[in-house]
């Protein structure tokens, strides 16, 4: 009981803990999150997204970020492809590798970026991974998840859907309806980051976030899709991460 509290206040405070799950009440192992961006170096909006995400994550006065970091370890790779970015490549690293097709069997002599990041993921484990991209064709912000990946199940699908719905509430530039169809690798193909995460780490959620090159058709503006809007979308992802935190890693 805290000083100055009435009996009713004290009872209400106790109820907050009585209704909490054991993980929320007692602590325990932190959830493990990974956020990576710019596997395709020409998708510069992924770096702008990262600026917004990291700036908010490290804001000591932001209560959502503070709570997230109390209950999770967040591993961040702001630019998966720095050599390709420096060279002005659209989709490949300095050796010609499309990094988001290298996750099944990365080679240190061809795709070292993926080789070392995947090894680090093996060391820490992964319970949720978000891979940030830009899409040249679709005029929307959307997520493609683990659908069609071996081992994908209703529990993970439900958590992923909740993440998407919370994200859309936190930032209306994100939406959960379009595109109605989206080209993806054949069922069972696990060469991308999100699919490899799903098959490699039990119960993990792997997702690819896409942003438009031109604009979000639902909230179009004269300046199109800007660096600031990318950054704001990045910042809003923290709300969605905190919301699903009790559901990942085996749930409560």
Image (cartoon, rainbow, N blue to C red):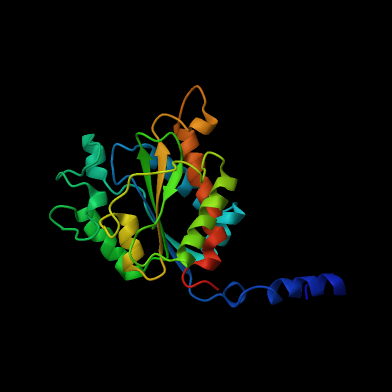
Q: Is residue 67 left or right of residue 137?
A: right
Q: Is residue 93 left or right of residue 149?
A: left
Say if 3 sits above or below 226 in the image: below
Residue 45, visible in the rendered structure: yes
Which quarter of the rendered picture does the N terminus lie within? Answer: bottom right
User: In the image, residue 160 lies at what x, y percent?
Assistant: 48, 58
- The residue under the point 54% across, 57% down is 162
User: In the image, residue 43 lies at what x, y percent?
Assistant: 33, 38
Camera-side residue: 35 or 201? 201
Camera-side residue: 136 or 232? 136
User: In the image, residue 87 lies at what x, y percent?
Assistant: 21, 36
Q: Quadrant of residue 180?
A: top left
- Residue farthest to the left? 109
User: In the image, residue 190 lies at what x, y percent?
Assistant: 27, 59
- The residue under the point 59% across, 55% down is 64
- The residue under the point 41% across, 65% down is 204
- The residue under the point 47% across, 47% down is 53
Which quarter of the rendered picture does the C terminus lie within? Answer: bottom right
Q: Quadrant of residue 199?
A: bottom left
Camera-side residue: 182 or 139? 182
Q: How many marks?
A: 0
């Amino acid at each position: 009981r805290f000083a100055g509290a009435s009996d009713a206040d004290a009872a209400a405070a106790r109820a907050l803990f009585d209704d909490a799950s054991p993980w929320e009440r007692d602590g325990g192992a932190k959830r493990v999150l990974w956020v990576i961006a710019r596997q395709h170096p020409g998708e510069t909006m992924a770096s702008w997204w990262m600026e917004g995400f990291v700036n908010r994550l490290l804001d000591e006065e932001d209560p959502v970020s503070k709570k997230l970091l109390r209950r999770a370890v967040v591993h961040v790779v702001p630019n998966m492809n720095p050599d390709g970015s420096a060279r002005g490549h659209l989709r490949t690293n300095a050796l010609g590798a499309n990094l988001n097709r290298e996750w099944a069997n990365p080679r240190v002599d061809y795709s070292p970026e993926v080789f070392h990041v995947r090894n680090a993921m093996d060391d820490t484990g992964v319970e949720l991974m978000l891979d940030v991209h830009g899409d040249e064709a679709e005029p929307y912000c959307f997520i493609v998840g683990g659908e069609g990946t071996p081992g994908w199940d209703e529990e993970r699908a439900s958590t992923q859907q909740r993440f998407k719905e919370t994200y859309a509430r936190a930032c209306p530039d994100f939406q959960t309806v379009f595109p109605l169809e989206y080209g993806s690798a054949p069922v069972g193909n696990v060469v991308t980051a999100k699919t490899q995460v799903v098959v490699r780490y039990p119960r993990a959620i792997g997702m690819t976030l896409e942003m438009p090159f031109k604009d979000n058709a639902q909230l179009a503006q004269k300046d199109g899709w800007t660096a600031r809007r990318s950054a704001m979308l990045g910042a809003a992802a923290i709300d969605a991460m905190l919301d699903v935190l009790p559901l990942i890693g085996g749930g409560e």
